[in-house]
Amino acid sequence: MSADNLQEPVSEQLLLDALKVFEERIPFNRVLGLHIERTKAGETAIRFDMREELVGNFTRGSLHGGVISSSLDVIGGLVAFLALLEREQPESLADGAARFSRLGTIDLRVDYLRPGLGESFVATGYVLRTGRKVVVTRMELHNDEATLIAVGTGAYSIG
């Protein structure tokens, strides 16, 4: 690979603006109570606390399966979005708004491994492959005791 093919990292301000959009401007993310915990070296994490509104099995008090799949979809979409930012290198989010508005889930596979029990949860994700039109991601959901609750793979349209 030549030096010409190496991409500059996304500017700190652009990254902060993108994370703010995911945390504050997407109503469903606010309903779930999602907060971005970290972004580093190709891995991003979001966190949310258990609340009564998120319970699916009231006798057990575990997360609803839709909350589990939604949190995995959000983290997968976020890492796909960050990959698109890195590739496109817009000056600002406004400059790339039309391109970014086409981001969407094509396919989502979730494997539920254990009941969603815990006080809080962290979903992590990273990119497996970035193509011209599709980003493929891998995601995991852990509880506050680091127990793996679910894993997922997502494909996201970026083109």
Image (tube, rainbow, N blue to C red):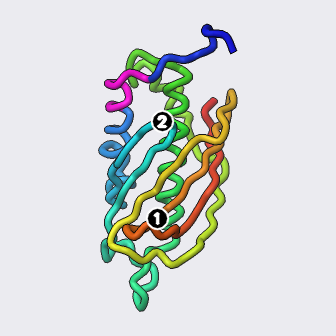
The answer to whether residue 15 is magenta is yes
What amino acid is found at the position of numbered circle 1 in the picture? Answer: His
- Give the image location of residue 83, x and y in percent: 54, 32
- Give the image location of residue 15, x and y in percent: 38, 30
Which quadrant holds residue 151? bottom right
Residue that label 1 marks: 142
For the residue labelled by badge 2, is the local secondary structure a helix, a strand or a loop?
Answer: loop
For the residue labelled by badge 1, is the local secondary structure a helix, a strand or a loop?
Answer: strand
Decide: is 113 above or below 80. Answer: below
Residue that label 2 marks: 41
Give the main secondary structure of the magenta stretch. helix
- Give the image location of residue 78, x and y in percent: 48, 42
Callouts 2 and 1 close, C-beta under 8 Å: no
Q: Residue at x 67, y 37 (%)?
A: 129
- Give the image location of residue 71, x and y in percent: 47, 58
Decide: is 114 above or below 67. Answer: below
